[in-house]
Image (cartoon, rainbow, N blue to C red):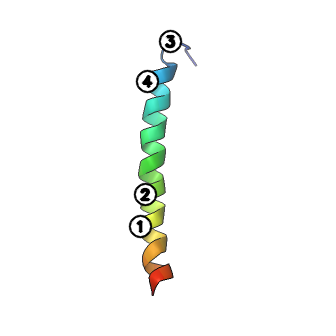
Amino acid sequence: MKTIDLPKLRNAEYLQYMKDFAGIINLIIPQVCR
């Protein structure tokens, strides 16, 4: 892992994590609300 690319990599990982997290929430919430 390059320390120079760390902020950019971390930002990309964060965005991907948020997408995955939102996807999981969208799957769970409709089941919980019923």
Disc 3 marks a residue whose amino acid type is Ile
Residue beneath label 1, please?
A: 26
> From the viewer's perspective, is residue 32 above or below residue 7?
below
Q: CA distance from mark 4 to mark 3?
A: 9 Å
Q: CA distance from mark 2 to mark 4?
A: 21 Å
Q: CA distance from mark 3 to mark 2?
A: 29 Å
- Please name the residue shown 50% across and 12% down the image: 4
Q: Position of residue 9 (x, y in %)?
A: 47, 26
> From the viewer's perspective, is residue 5 above or below residue 28?
above
Residue beneath label 2, please?
A: 22
- Please name the residue shown 45% across and 87% down the image: 34
Q: CA distance from mark 3 to mark 1?
A: 35 Å
Q: CA distance from mark 1 to mark 4?
A: 27 Å
The answer to which quarter of the image holds residue 12 is top left
Task: Pick whichever of labels 2 and 4 is earlier in the sequence.
Answer: 4
Task: Pick whichever of labels 1 and 4 is earlier in the sequence.
Answer: 4
Please tell me whether mark 2 sits on a helix, a strand or a loop. helix
Q: Quadrant of the N terminus?
A: top right
Q: CA distance from mark 2 to mark 1?
A: 6 Å
Please tell me whether mark 1 sits on a helix, a strand or a loop. helix
Task: Pick whichever of labels 3 and 1 is earlier in the sequence.
Answer: 3
